[in-house]
Image (cartoon, grey):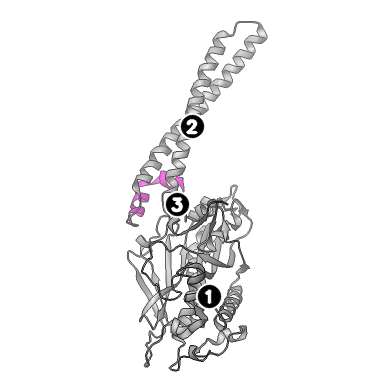
Amino acid sequence: MLDIRLIRRDPDAVRAALARRGDADTTALDAVVRTDARRREILPELESLRAEQNAANQAIAAAKKSGEGFDEAVAKMRDVAGRAKALDEELATVDAELTESLQRLPNLPDETAAPEDTVVKEVGEAWVPSWPVRDHLELAGERIDMERGARLSGSRFAYLRGALARLELSLVSWVMDHLGEYGFEPVIPPVLVREEALYGTGFLPDTEQQIYHLPADDLYLVGTSEVALASLHAGEIVDELPLRYAGFSPCFRREAGAAGKDTRGIFRVHQFDKVEMFAFVEPDKSVEEHERLLAIEESIMQALNLPYRVVNIAVDDLGASAAKKYDCEAWLPSQQRYRELTSTSNTTDYQARRLEIRYRPEGAKRPETLHTLNGTAVAVGRTLIALLENGQREDGSVALPEVLRGYGAPEVLPPASTI
């Protein structure tokens, strides 16, 4: 949620920033300006009427004590009380309209968010094998069982079996240790959350078409553990910053509107596992923290020997909560193009304001809203795809990164034809 004080100070600057997003609802900003102005008119009027009520009550009490008539004072008190009640009711209506309009506004984009997707760097060789390239399903064979997954749950579900199930566990264990070196506390959060958690992170009202809802319990399945990690300190004043968490969880996405896109294999599925980084920082540290999260994502890609590129995501493609986002896209030889593997977003004070998470700056009298950031460490399914395709050999076997060998992963996955 945007800071109302920022909108009051310079609504034209806010309007110009929102216009960079392309599809921002400027009528919501107009409604915020209008209702906030009326609210600021009502408050002093209401305060004045309450002062009159107090004076009228004192006059009635004094008249009763002296034995004088107090009919006039009672009449005046009733008139004032009636006007105060009407203003109270209007204030409640205005407050509701103001909140609803603020909820519709996305975060303001950072000045350095790109006008269009911009490649920041490329690392490693975007290679194509000299032999007929195999995609991840050909390399995995029945270790990725799409047929039985579809039979069980429908399309876009899969069983991971045998060596690939073990490879996922190796990958997650390694990346948790890797993040521990950067000060992240491991967390396994709930994956069923209340509506206010999705609202607080900006997924509602924005991406409801992608979210699984359980109406009988009024709970939602998360599409990322960002939701649960952000809410870990909801309503709190935290004592010490930064706070950094690494959450591992299954994630669920309906993929509505994705019909016909990436239907082969496990690139775009309804359920997948992910390790997510989340940070709570002081406002003047969030830009630095964003670059830090990107550097960690790159360190993971490099340790896994994956060719990749970094993309500064176009401002009109940012989610509601993000002020700036980077994607790391891994090279997939079977598609001969880069595909998104991880992303990291600076959400500034947008989520923290919605979730009422604050900190107390040193020497400050009042707590202030902090900043939050998130970043994918490992989206397991897509990372397995990248590992299989970039590690493939001519005989169909797959060489695996050395960093995973101490975590139970073999040096080489045998060809699918031999299992």
Q: Nearer the viewer, residue 116 or 282?
A: 116
> Image quarter for residue 111?
bottom left
The picture quadrant where one finds residue 128 is bottom left
| Mark 3: few/some/many CA within 10 Å (<14, 14-19, 20+) | some
Q: Tags 2 and 1 in contact by the CB under 8 Å rule?
A: no
Q: Can you tell which of label 2 and label 3 is closer to the viewer?
A: 3
Q: What residue type is labelled 2?
A: Leu
Nearest to the eye among marks 2 and 1: give it: 1
Q: Residue 159 carries which label?
A: 1
- Which percent across, then down, holds residue 348? 48, 58
The amino acid pointed to by label 1 is Tyr
Q: In whole angstroms, how far apart are the C-alphas of marks 2 and 1? A: 60 Å
Q: Residue furthest top?
A: 68
Question: Measured along the vertical axis of the image, is residue 324 above or below residue 6?
Answer: below
Q: Which of 234 and 155 is in front in this view?
A: 155
Q: Does the magenta stretch include residue 7?
A: yes
- Residue type, numbered disc 3: Pro
